[in-house]
Image: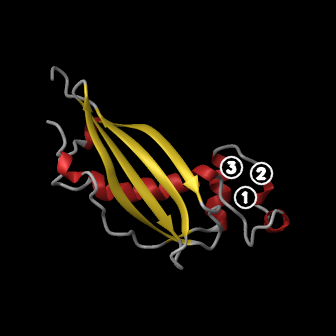
Amino acid sequence: MALDQSFVGRTYPPTVPYEVGREKIREFAEAVGDDNPAYTDPAAATALGHPEVIAPPTFVFAITFAAAGQVVEDPQLGLDYSRVVHGDQRFAYSRPVRAGDRLRVTSTIEAIKSLAGNDILDIRGEVHDEAGEHVVTAWTKLVARAAEGA
C-alpha cells in the first residue's frame, strides 16, 4: 500500500538534546578508521581553529537517524519498517559538530514517491545546538520494498 502523500511537509517535534562527548567522537572515528587528530586531540582541534575536538562528518547520522524514528514509528504514516532499506544519506554543514554540543533534531518528510511498487521516503533532519544555531542538515532516503508478489 502506497504511503499517504498528505504527509509530505509534516514536521515532527524536536528531539531531546543529545550531548556530544569526546569519547563518543573518538569511538566513532576509530570505528570508521579515520585517524584525523582533530577528532581526538584538543590541541590539534584548537590548532585548526576549533574550540573543542570535532566529529567526523558522518557522526551525526546516528543522531539524525534516531530522530527519523519519529517518522518511521508514526502509525498514521503506515510504513512497514520490516521492508525498509537505507537508500541514501547526505549532509550540509554550517559548522562541524563539536564535543560538548547539545544537539536537537527536527525531522520533516520532504517527499514520498512510489516506484515499481516501492515507497521512497525522503526525511530532512535539521540539527541545531542549544543556542538555536544551525549545525547541519541531514537528508535520509528510506526505501520500503514492495511486498513479494505485489
Decide: marks 1, 3 in contact (CB < 8 A)?
Answer: no
Decide: marks 3, 2 in contact (CB < 8 A)?
Answer: no
Task: Judge whether 37 appears above or below 50 on screen.
Answer: above
Location of residue 116 in the rendering, given as x and y in whole percent from the top left corner: 25, 24
Left or right, 1 with respect to 109, comes to: left
Disc 1, SS: helix
Q: In which quarter of the image is the C terminus?
A: top left
Task: Judge whether 58 appears above or below 104 on screen.
Answer: above
| Residue type highlighted by circle 3 | Glu
Disc 2 target residue? 36
> In whole angstroms, how far apart are the C-alphas of marks 2 and 1?
6 Å
Question: Going 41% across and 57% down the picture, which residue do you hit?
Answer: 66
Q: Badge 1: how crowded within 10 Å, few (<14), some, or many (20+)?
A: many
Decide: marks 2, 1 in contact (CB < 8 A)?
Answer: yes
Residue 30, numbered circle: 3
Left or right, 124 with respect to 120, comes to: right
Q: Badge 2: how crowded within 10 Å, few (<14), some, or many (20+)?
A: some
Rendered image quadrant of residue 144: top left
Disc 1 target residue? 39
| Residue type highlighted by circle 2 | Asn
Viewer-closest of 103 and 139:
139
Disc 3, SS: helix
